[in-house]
Amino acid sequence: MTTTDTHCPYCSLQCGMRLTGPDRPGAAARVLERPDFPVNRGALCGKGQSATELLDGARRLTEPLVRDGAGALRTASWAEALDRVAEGLRSTAERHGRDAVAVFGGGGLTNEKAYLLGKFARVVLRTPHIDYNGRFCMSSAAAAHRRAFGLDRGLPFPLADVATADCVILVGGNPAETMPPALRYFRELRERGGTLIVVDPRRTRTAEQADLHLQPVPGTDLALALGLLHLAVADDLVDNRFVAERTTGFAEARTAAMNYWPTRVERITGVTAGQLARTVELFAGAEKAIVLTARGPEQQSKGVDTVGAWINLCLALGKAGRPGSGYGCLTGQGNGQGGREHGQKADQLPGYRSIEDPAARAHLGEVWGVDPAELPGPGRSAYELLDTLGTEGGARALFLLGSNPVVSAPRAGHVTERLRALDFLAVSDLVLSETAQLADVVLPVTQWAEETGTLTNLEGRVILRQAALAAPAGVRSDLAVLHELAARLGVEKGFPTDPEEAFEELRRASAGGQADYAGISYRRIKEQDGVFWPCPDEQHPGTPRLFLDRFATEDGRARFVPVSYRPAAELPDDAYPLYLTTGRVLAQYQSGAQTRRVPQLAQAAPGPFVELHPQLAERLGVAEGEPLRVTSRRGRAVAPARVTDTIRPDTVFMPFHWAGAGRANTLTNPALDPVSRMPEFKVCAVRVERVR
């Protein structure tokens, strides 16, 4: 019986684990702790512990499916399925032009897959239209990071630095449920005498462990951060030396913040002036202090400015560019970081290069052996791509890998209609997700334990997930799929099926870029438990902590960006008097396509619900467990009531893991941030009624 060191297939922690092969016929592989991996130190949540359940052939796809003349999906050979995909993509381009073909990727794809998928779109299909579901995850934080620091890496320091800080402000994140092994760092912070401040409209499991919980109105995090900077200036707490030596633009940011005095911010956010003052006092007084944001402030139509305001607070108080202090984003998906670094985003080339930069295009043209002038320009962002499917000027054929927008996209009912309107849809996935059910061709692909590849966790640590088990006979890897499709579409070379060969090309492609992997190899990753980028050559040690000497801007200084509060795109009114916010629960993950198929996870979290305050429940005349109808301007959802005083009386919460009548994203607002193109998942106006 063999044991393989590998990593969990779920969130951005990429927890280390060990897999042992079946010890007898019919037995399942077992997950064991891997205490020597530094991120989780052996701890695993229920999702990680049960990750091998989906390796069972009964719960997954093991043969390609094609849609027959009667409209039903039937099994097919790989040759037939791949021929159908190639013909669907080719014929659409011939009829409507190359821009009528699009690719949609996923934040769970390995770096090798993400890299070759971007190359496939731009070299084989020659379409500008490729984006991925990671746009829905951390794109606002990424844009704010680049605007302020010149570079985007989720955490510019190891996660372990959280435990050594004296004060941490966690804004709109609930790691107790979304990444439980990370919670130990927050506990260790408090055990050392540090202070944890949580900002969240709900008193989550994480907020219950905080020293101070700020419970703002959904969508007002920007005003809250501006109010804190106002107090820092008014109370003479600004680190003037740091500001003068390591930043630019403070005067303009200070002027903007001075419009947000405490009583005004209290009226906007519901957070009292006393709580604001206490927060500034604790954060400014800490020698080492960190602000962490997650989807709460980021999934807003002003998410970039909101994150920027929290960064401004860090810079003003000198809590950045120093050991133990800084701003970071708790990335969500397993490879949300690496997925955007190497070519899945509509406006980026590998190495975190801009697709509009002539030098970047020339470099990739050389690596790929193509004329840079033939590389397409930027395409549509994720929601804009989905919103225009099947329309005049929109994509008419879509190749989708590892994503389930029928459940996960905002205004999901509309997105489902757009997917149905396509001339051709091909889906590569490990299960028959709700999106795959709409496809003309479904390709069954290998899972995490059956393939080798790298991912980049929330710290910027490049890790190696190693194959431990053989895949079922009818299943192929995404790399093999791309290789076969490229060949059928006239590109015989450049799409290796061996992941290490693909990674070696990725190293060359990323060389000289911001996300430089040139010095990272499979060997180094194995020897060092991961390597932090940037790592430009094999003698370079990697970069666990960024910005200690200079920021990644031209002049080496961080940039303050003046921002002003603006309300959510949609506010409650007489017709829709309540706020809706959405999120995750402990036992489920993302669209639930995988976790809903795991019996113990489905038992722990069997379906959607509507969380509401007892005052609201009394007003509606509804009791625990009774069905509620939640209606927004985009549709309606029905789910049982969950009555709790941990939520604001003016707000309801729904988890977004389920399809069908309880699909939360039927309701959500696709209003986009003007910079990141992030939809406003986290706040919209709804009406809640008892179902009679």
Image: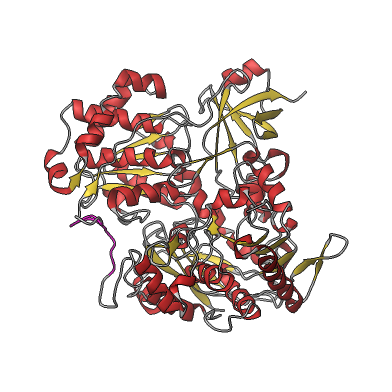
Would residue 37 be visible to someone looking at this image? no
Would residue 460 be visible to someone looking at this image? yes
Who's the residue at 33% across and 52% down the image? 146
Extreme residue in the right direction: 70
| Magenta span main SS | loop
Across and down, in percent, residue 297 comes to 43, 39
Looking at the rendered image, the quarter that the C terminus falls into is top right
Q: Is residue 560 above or below residue 686?
A: below
Across and down, in percent, residue 91 comes to 71, 69
Across and down, in percent, residue 630 comes to 66, 29
Quarter-of-image position of residue 318: top left
Who's the residue at 46% across and 80% down the image? 369
Q: Between 650 and 259, which is closer to the camera in this rendering? A: 259
User: Residue 546 lies in magenta, yes or no?
Assistant: yes
Across and down, in percent, residue 237 comes to 17, 32
In the rendered view, does 81 fall on the left or right side of 512?
right
Which span of residues is magenta-colored? 542-552
Extreme residue in the top direction: 619
Q: Between 566 and 30, which is closer to the camera in this rendering? A: 566
